[in-house]
Image (spheres, rainbow, N blue to C red):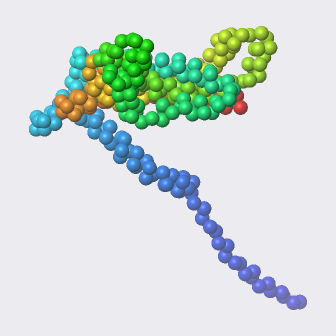
Amino acid sequence: MTATTTAPLATTPVRTTRQPSARLRAWATRAPLLPALVFMIAVTQLPFVATLVISFFDWNALYPKARHFTGVDNYREVLTDADLRHSVWTTVLLTVAVVLASLVLGLILALLLDRRFRGRGVVRTLLIAPFLVVPVAAALLWKHVLYNPEYGLLNGLLHYVGGPQPDWISNTPLLAVEASLVWQWTPFMMLILLAGLQSRDPQQLEAARVDGASDWQIFRHLTLPHLRRYLELGALLGSIYIVQNFDAVFTITSGGLGTANLPYTVYQSFYQAHANGLASAAGVLVVIGSIIIATFALRVVSSLFREEVGRA
């Protein structure tokens, strides 16, 4: 009887590579964004926090040792002072007038550009050009090239037909500012509304024409309801920027003749009166108003995205 012995099997060690955890992978993908995040916080959030803190102080740059904490007195003064309330009203009036006029003109131009005709690309580029002009340059253009009572283009045309020679800025200061802003913001509204027009369902339009609907009926019952979201988006985005407009008021009228809006009043309080606390309080109110408008704008944008996804 023979006994067989089996040698133990040689086992080779198995190398296991440790997979990085999900948290580590997430940090690795987000790490390149950290410098941009730090830069954004340093440039935007820290100055706003400093402005918020200063707004609770009676802080005049001419008397640095006399500054003291006053709570919400600066905000109360912003809301009760006659000049500041007038600047708030001017801001509202300027914003509403410019947004409504830009939307109406932008809708007309968008309807024209939605049709096919020779040279449509060139015309579209020319109509977009005013929006690409630097705001200060656009304000200077209107002030000197168009409004000047001696050599301006408007008075030149009136002189050619034997009309009067008014001083546009002195006679209608707020309207002069509004006209320059409407000229610059109409292309922005036109682009938004043109995108809405080109997103219409062509089969629905063709079916309406086959049923005998006129162009006005198609516009009223199909096009206008379809453009409602785009009109809201254009109005909200335009309001965000026009509420904060400073260039046109400063360049055309220097805030005089009742055209000082809230951003220009902040400038006056900070750089001329050196009332840092009061100017900071007014600036915080402007930011809060812009955030409220931006919140509605984001909701409109998200609803537009949901509608496009549902349509796809």
Relative horizontal placement of residue 149, taking residue 298 as reference (left or right): left
What residue sits 22% from the left and 21% below the top? 77
Q: Does the image show residue 32?
A: yes
Residue at (64% x, 30% y) in the render: 120
Q: Is residue 139 visible?
A: no
- x and y percent of residue 115 in the render? 67, 24
Residue 9 image point, x, y percent: 75, 80
- Residue 116 place in picture, x, y as percent: 69, 26
Residue 47, compared with residue 117, is above or below; it is below
- Identify the image quadrant of residue 50: top left
Front in this rendered view, residue 21 or 148 = 148
Which residue reaches farthest bottom?
Answer: 2
- Tell whether 278 sits left or right of 39: left
Q: Which residue does the image show at 42% across and 36% down from the upper left?
A: 134
Give how far across and how far down residue 2 sits, in percent: 87, 90
* Residue at the (74%, 10%) spot, across then down: 213
Q: Quadrant of the C terminus?
A: top right
Give the vertical position of 47 relative to 159 (above or below): below
Quadrant position of residue 215: top right
